Amino acid sequence: MQFYFREMNEIYATDILNWKYEEPYDFYNNDLCDESLKEFLKNPYYSIFNDKEELVGFYCTGTAAQVPKGRDYGAYLDECIDVGIGMKPELTGKGYGSEFFSFILNQLQQENHSPLRLTVATFNTRAIHLYEKLGFKKVMEFTASTEFITMKKG
C-alpha cells in the first residue's frame, strides 16, 4: 500500500474523531467536540492517505503526542521528537502497521536526526510488538488513566 501526507484540516479531523475502535482499543476513541477538533487543528497533526485517496490514519508530534500525566513522572525530560499515530479502525490488526508506521518514521527521520519517542498503553501489546520490531526500546512505565510505557529509538 502506498501512503502520502496531507495537512490536517477540519474535514479530516472530523472523520478521525468519528472513528470507533473495538475493545480493548476503544480506549483510543475520541469524542467529536470543539475541544478535540481544536486539538487536531492547532497542533502538529498530519493526515495519511493511501493511493486510493482514502484517509487511513494520522500522526502527531511534540506535546500532542505525549500523555500529560507522564510529565509528572519525568517521562519527557530528554530531548526527543515525540510521535503519536492512529490508524483507521478497519485497517488495524490486518498487517498494515509495519508499512504504515515505517512510512511515518521515514518522514520524521528525513526531517531531523533527534531520537524518536512514543507513549503507548501497556495493554496494547500489538502496537508494542510493532514498535519493538521497528527498533524502539522500552524506557519507562507510568500510570495515568491507565498504565503507559514510553519507548525510544535512536
Image (cartoon, rainbow, N blue to C red):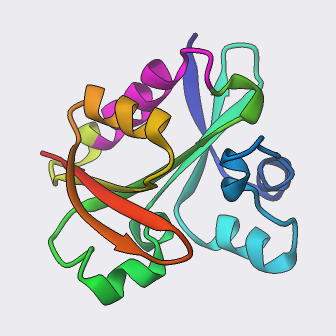
Residue at 77% x, 25% y is 54
Height in image: 47 above or below 50?
Answer: below
Height in image: 116 above or below 142?
Answer: above
| Residue 25 image point, x, y percent | 67, 46
Does 100 sit left or right of 26 as displayed?
A: left
> Within the image, what quadrant is residue 38 found in?
bottom right
Magenta stretch: give its range: 93-108
Q: Main secondary structure of the magenta part?
A: helix
Height in image: 78 above or below 95?
Answer: below
| Residue 68 image point, x, y percent | 46, 81
| Residue 82 image point, x, y percent | 34, 60
Height in image: 1 above or below 96?
Answer: above
| Residue 33 image point, x, y percent | 87, 73
Q: Is residue 73 magenta-colored?
A: no
> Within the image, what quadrant is residue 101 found in?
top left
Residue 59 vs residue 110, the one in the foreground = 59
Does 99 sit left or right of 48 as displayed?
A: left
Residue 128 vs residue 55, the one in the foreground = 128
